[in-house]
Image (cartoon, rainbow, N blue to C red):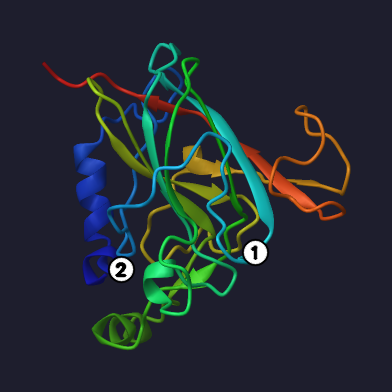
Amino acid sequence: MLSDTLGVSMLVDLLAEPASAGAAGFATESTVLGPFYAAGSPEREYGASIVERPSGDLTWYTGHVTDTDGNPIAGATLDVWQNADDMFYAVQNSGAPPDNLRGVFRTRPDGSFAFLGVRPTDYPIPDDGPVGQLLGRTGRHPWRPAHIHVIVSAPGYQSVATHIFDADSKYLTSDAVFAVKASLVRTFERHEPGTAAGRGDAPPGVPPGQPWYSLSHDFRLSRAAG
């Protein structure tokens, strides 16, 4: 956490990442892994929900995983985790199901993926120790802009640990860990009950009469060296 708030983690990320990453025709940009990643998330089916208890505004996430030329990658793995509307990740909250808002998905033959999650919320990083003292002495806040974490990988390709940031967050320009990259910022679309989103009515898992959000985002992977 101290490395993240000092900007060291993002400096290492920037030095390791090609300058063209995130540009058209190049790989998705990486960003910090963060301290709340936990290995061993359950593998879930295409379109399944990672919401194991009420955790926020339901959101239908879709997209494709491709190579840098736009060719679909079948069987790519997306390891997903996010915080709930109480601002905690499952690993922070002993009262939450341990696999809440976590899951591993694999792309279909056309490279597509889909799952039901929640719209992420802004949250403060833990600031009750040396990190909090550092932030206080430098006049900085502990807040992170709303985001969802994804590690995308596939055999023969370079994996990427990245975020999708909510364009409506007020902390995009002052992220406590300096992790925001413009290519990773996206707009969440709100849908009123019964309205369509190019896929028919509300996706599976959204109760009748409840508004929901959608987000479409594609990931591009570079081929592994050698």
Q: Circle 1 sits on which residue?
A: 56
The mark that comes first in sequence, 2 or 1, is 2
Mark 2 closeness class: few <14, some 14–19, many ≥20 residues within 10 Å = many
Q: Circle 2 sits on which residue?
A: 5
Q: Quadrant of residue 71?
A: top left
121 vs 46, nearest the viewer: 46
Q: Are marks 2 and 1 in contact (CB under 8 Å)?
A: no
Q: Residue at x 29, y 22 (%)?
A: 222
Q: Residue at x 24, y 56 (%)?
A: 9
Q: Quadrant of the N terminus?
A: bottom left
64 vs 168, nearest the viewer: 64
Amino acid type at circle 1 is Gly
Label 2 sits on a secondary structure element that is helix
Label 1 sits on a secondary structure element that is loop
Residue 200 in the image: state x and y as whole percent.
81, 30
185 vs 151, nearest the viewer: 151
Left or right relative to 74: residue 117: right
Left or right relative to 42: residue 86: right
Residue 106 in the image: state x and y as whole percent.
42, 31
Up/down of 37 relative to 115, above or below: below
Residue positioned most to the left = 226
Up/down of 218 relative to 203, above or below: above
Residue 106, numbered circle: none
Up/down of 151 relative to 137, above or below: above
Nearer the camera: disc 2 or disc 1: 1
Residue 220 in the image: state x and y as whole percent.
40, 25
Residue 53 in the image: state x and y as whole percent.
59, 66
Q: CA distance from mark 2 to mark 1?
A: 27 Å
Mark 1 closeness class: few <14, some 14–19, many ≥20 residues within 10 Å = some
Q: Residue at x 34, y 64 (%)?
A: 36
Left or right relative to 105: residue 36: left
Amino acid type at circle 2 is Thr
